[in-house]
Each structure stands twice: as structure tokens, then as C-alpha cells.
Amino acid sequence: MESLVKNMNMVQLIFDLQAGLKFAFWNRMSIAHDTKLAQTEPSPTEFTIGHNVGSKGEVDKVMEQAKKAGATITVEANDTFWGVYSDYFQDPDGHLWEVVWNPQWDITE
Amino acid sequence: MESLVKNMNMVQLIFDLQAGLKFAFWNRMSIAHDTKLAQTEPSPTEFTIGHNVGSKGEVDKVMEQAKKAGATITVEANDTFWGVYSDYFQDPDGHLWEVVWNPQWDITE
């Protein structure tokens, strides 16, 4: 389920991911306004969002979807020396996403 | 459960929050290295982490804990015009946390 919340100049898009967890998109200007901080230059190295999937093929599939949706690939999918198969891309707002298959983690839908 | 993962110069502290959800702390230099991006100046207005709790008293309690742990309060707890009781603080790395009681959301532990 997703919902769009509008409060004056603040617009949020909220996704219910699972019990107790929501993921919301909110523009930087509104974050600055609401937290009473000066808005600063975007910095992609502040955080990454990890999306763990169940196989290498699924990593490749999500990567293709991201490319088609306008993402910028910063690291193509590869077998890393620490044992996971992963990539990184930036969404159109510059936020970093990692799509990962980690054979040591069980993924439950 | 938490675990400390060390890979060369990359150190991560990973918290298992609930089924399928992990929250990891990782330094900006490692994010830049791993994503092949240049490290940029910290920007607190990139994202906020929301912590929803079950009452106004619980908001105040978490706020006190954050203060004692060295947080910088940017917005003291208050009744907002959109109906929630919330505050904002920055952790010692500058990341923004919001502690919120939203009477329209059910909180399940």
C-alpha cells in the first residue's frame, strides 16, 4: 500500500513495506524546513539503501529495471571478494542503492 | 542481535531489527570506496530516520536518552499542526533522527 501525504509545501510518498516498517520519499527542502536546519548540498555518500534478493539472476533483473527507470550505474554487478554478488546504482535524486545476493543470508519474502 | 563485520578498511556494525530488516552503520569513506564515488561533504538534509513510539511520554524518554548519548536537538518535542508529537535530533555523525508519536498509527512491538 502506498499513500501520498500533503502538508502545505511538504509532500511525502509513503510505502508500507512490512509490519512496522514504512519507507517514505520526501524532498530535501522539506527535510531542512521541518528539522530547522539549513539545506545543504546533496551528498550521495551519506547512506545507501540495500536491497537483498535471492539469487544472482535476481540481482541482474533488478539492475535492468533500474537502468530502464533512469538509474546511473556506479558499480556493475560482480562477485566481490567478501562473497556477495552485488552492484550499486544512483536513482535520479542521487541516492545510492545496492542490490545484493548474499549466499550466507536467508531471504524470506 | 548485532554483528561487527570487518573487511579490510571497511567496518560495519549491523543490527537485525526484525525479519528481513537490517540496519547497518558504515563510515562515509567506505561508502565512497565501495560505490566508486568521490566522498562528498556530509549533508544532514539527505535523509531522516523515523522512530515511531507508542506515546508522548515515550517520545520524551527516547529524547532524554539521545541527549545523554550526545545528540544535538534541532527541534524539541512538540505537538505539530498535522497531529503528531515529535522532535528531531542529530547523532554525533550528523544524521537526523525523528522520534514520533502518531495517534493515527498503530505501533506493534
Image (spheres, coloured by chain):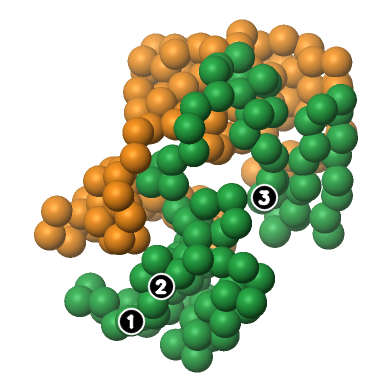
Chain colours: A orange, B green
B13 w.r.t. A95: above or below = below
Foreground label between 2 and 3: 2
Which amino acid type is marked by label 2? Asp
Q: Which mark is residue B23?
A: 3
Q: Residues within 10 Å of mark 2 (few under 14, many from 20)?
A: many
Q: Residues within 10 Å of mark 3 (few under 14, many from 20)?
A: some
Chain where mark 2 sits: B
Q: Is residue B74 left or right of residue B7?
A: left
Residue at image point 67% right, 38% down: B27
Is tag 1's residue or tag 3's residue first in the polypeptide sequence? Answer: 3
Is tag 2's residue or tag 1's residue first in the polypeptide sequence? Answer: 1
The reply to whether the C-beta atoms of the residues labelled 1 and 3 are less than 8 Å apart is no
B2 w.r.t. A78: above or below = below
Chain where mark 3 sits: B
Residue at image point 61% right, 23% down: B32
The reply to whether the C-beta atoms of the residues labelled 2 and 1 are less than 8 Å apart is yes
Q: Is residue A8 left or right of residue B27?
A: left
Q: Which residue is mark 2?
A: B87
Q: Residues within 10 Å of mark 1 (few under 14, many from 20)?
A: some
Q: Is residue B58 visible?
A: yes
Q: Are marks 2 and 3 on the same chain?
A: yes
Number of numbered discs overlaid on the protein picture: 3
- How far apart marks 1 and 3 lie (CA) works out to 27 Å
Which amino acid type is marked by label 3? Phe
Position of residue B41 measured from the top left corner of the image (x, y, whole percent): 48, 32
Q: Which residue is mark 1?
A: B78
Q: Quadrant of residue B69?
A: bottom right
Give B3 or A56, whichever is nearer the viewer.
B3
Which amino acid type is marked by label 1? Asn
The reply to whether the C-beta atoms of the residues labelled 2 and 3 are less than 8 Å apart is no
Position of residue A6 measured from the top left corner of the image (x, y, whole percent): 18, 57
Q: Are marks 2 and 1 on the same chain?
A: yes
